[in-house]
């Protein structure tokens, strides 16, 4: 049995992923990726670390995206200073 790593839904199915091998797609939340929670019904809690790993990866991606916001703010501040000195 497989489950979605994002929303824990069972409505996840494999799709042919070409060069990357198998990828999975979730009907409930739209997740698409190679990571999936696989378990036999006897030990469902064993895959908890996998789910945590996925969440950490998502958080890491969000953290990496943040510096661009600061660069954008710096550019805006620079342009405002430029306009101020021109007047
Ligand atoms: Zn899902």
Image (cartoon, grey):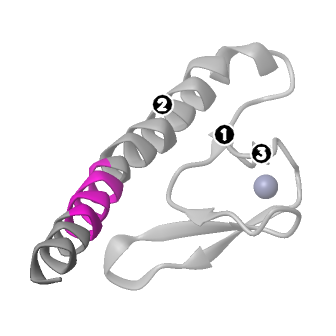
Which residue has dot 3 on it?
3
Which label's residue is closer to the chain start, 3 or 2? 3
Question: Up-down: is 85 above or below 73?
Answer: below
The quarter of the picture where the C terminus appears is bottom left
Nearest to the observer: residue 27 or residue 21: 27
Which label's residue is closer to the chain start, 1 or 3? 3
Query: Which mark identifies residue 64?
Result: none
Mark 1 is surrounded, within 10 Å at the Cα level, by few (under 14), some (14 to 19) or many (20 or more) other residues, namely many
Q: Position of residue 73 (x, y in %)?
A: 31, 59
Instruction: Evaluate if marks 1 and 3 touch, with contact meaning CB atoms under 8 Å apart.
Output: yes
Nearest to the observer: residue 83 or residue 11: 83
Q: Position of residue 8 (x, y in %)?
A: 82, 41
**Alpha carbon of mark 1 to alpha carbon of mark 3: how far?**
5 Å
Label 1 CB-ligand 1 distance < 8 A:
no
Which label's residue is closer to the chain start, 2 or 1? 1
Q: Position of residue 32 (x, y in %)?
A: 61, 67
**Alpha carbon of mark 2 to alpha carbon of mark 1: how far?**
15 Å
């Amino acid at each position: 049995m497989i489950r979605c790593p994002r929303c824990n839904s069972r409505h996840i199915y494999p799709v042919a992923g070409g060069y990357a091998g198998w990828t999975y797609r979730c009907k409930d939340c739209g997740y698409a990726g190679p990571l999936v929670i696989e378990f036999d019904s006897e030990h469902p809690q064993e895959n908890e670390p996998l789910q945590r790993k996925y969440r950490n990866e998502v958080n890491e991606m969000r953290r990496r995206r943040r510096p661009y916001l600061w660069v954008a703010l710096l550019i805006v501040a620079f342009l405002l200073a430029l306009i101020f000195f021109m007047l």
